[in-house]
Amino acid sequence: MNKDFLLLQINDALFPIGSYTHSFGLETYIQMHLVKDAQSALKYLQANLSTQFLYTELLSLKLTHQYTQTQDLDKILDIERLICISTSPMELRSANQKLGNRFLKTIKILSLSPKDFFHKYLESANIPTHSSAYGVFCACMELDLKTAVRHYLYAQSSNMVTNCVKTIPLSQNDGQKILLELQKTFEEILQKLDSLNEKHLCASSIHNDIKAMQHETLYSRLYMS
């Protein structure tokens, strides 16, 4: 098993977990003309990645990976419960759990041999998120944490850029320019992540939560969140 190729596969846009059906509040920003061109899209992505994404998704990935190393199942389940109760918007809560469950279901059909702890986690996880399930799986497959985080960060950022390109809309060239511009933000986020611990988990962006709630009542919608 080539671990580099495995990481590429489970982070690929074609890995069937349904990410393409969710904008996580972005659609509201676009309909309200707060995100309307390449410049505003870049600012939105920089803000979202440095707040909501860092303190919830990346940090939970890091923590669940670390707790898997010590086989602390209770801590992992506590993290998933905390994410659930800290995510105020209903659509974001639902999206987190749908993506987490779909990730685990897809992993189960592959001919992989993770550590036994992964099967204990599968039996106990009632409200998994994509990032927490991904963190546990990567640890059980002995995939390096820093490498797993980098792959996840880039893949999810690329998905966000794709949503901007399709929905604003922008040109494909604009999308690639935005991704390149985000490299500096990626480095800042990864450096910040090193200093974060469990007390920082779910320090979210209230503005994004509000936009995610407003998404529930948009007149027309392309995305489920």
Image: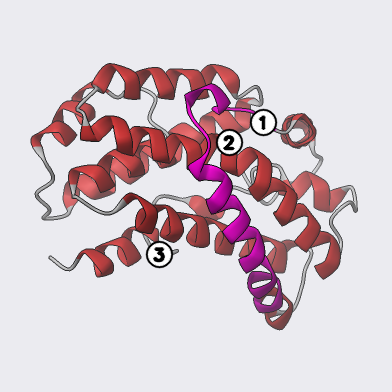
- Residue 140 on image: x %, y %: 19, 43
The answer to whether one can see residue 95 in this image is no
What residue do we see at 84% from left, 56% from top? 35
Task: Rate crowding at label 3 as few (under 14), some (14 to 19) or many (20 or more) other CA atoms within 10 Å.
Answer: some
Amino acid bearing label 1:
Ser
Amino acid bearing label 3:
Asp
User: Comparing marks 3 and 1, which lies closer to the viewer?
Assistant: 1
Q: Relative to residue 32, is residue 218 drawn left or right?
A: left
- Quadrant position of residue 90: top right
For marks 2 and 1 on the same chain, the one whose residue lies earlier in the sequence: 2
Task: Tell me the quarter of the image containing the C terminus.
Answer: top right
Labels 2 and 1 touching (C-beta < 8 A): yes
Task: Rate crowding at label 2 as few (under 14), some (14 to 19) or many (20 or more) other CA atoms within 10 Å.
Answer: many
- Residue 138 on image: x %, y %: 27, 48
User: Comparing marks 2 and 3, which lies closer to the viewer?
Assistant: 2
Query: Of helix, strand and loop, which one carries label 2?
Result: helix
| Main secondary-structure element of the magenta-colored stretch | helix
Q: Is residue 122 magenta?
A: no
Q: Which residue is mark 1?
A: 204
- Residue 224 on image: x %, y %: 61, 42
What residue do we see at 67% from left, 31% from top? 204
Q: Which residues are magenta?
A: 176-204
Q: Which residue is mark 3?
A: 12
Question: Which disc is residue 219 wearing?
Answer: none
Q: Is residue 198 magenta?
A: yes
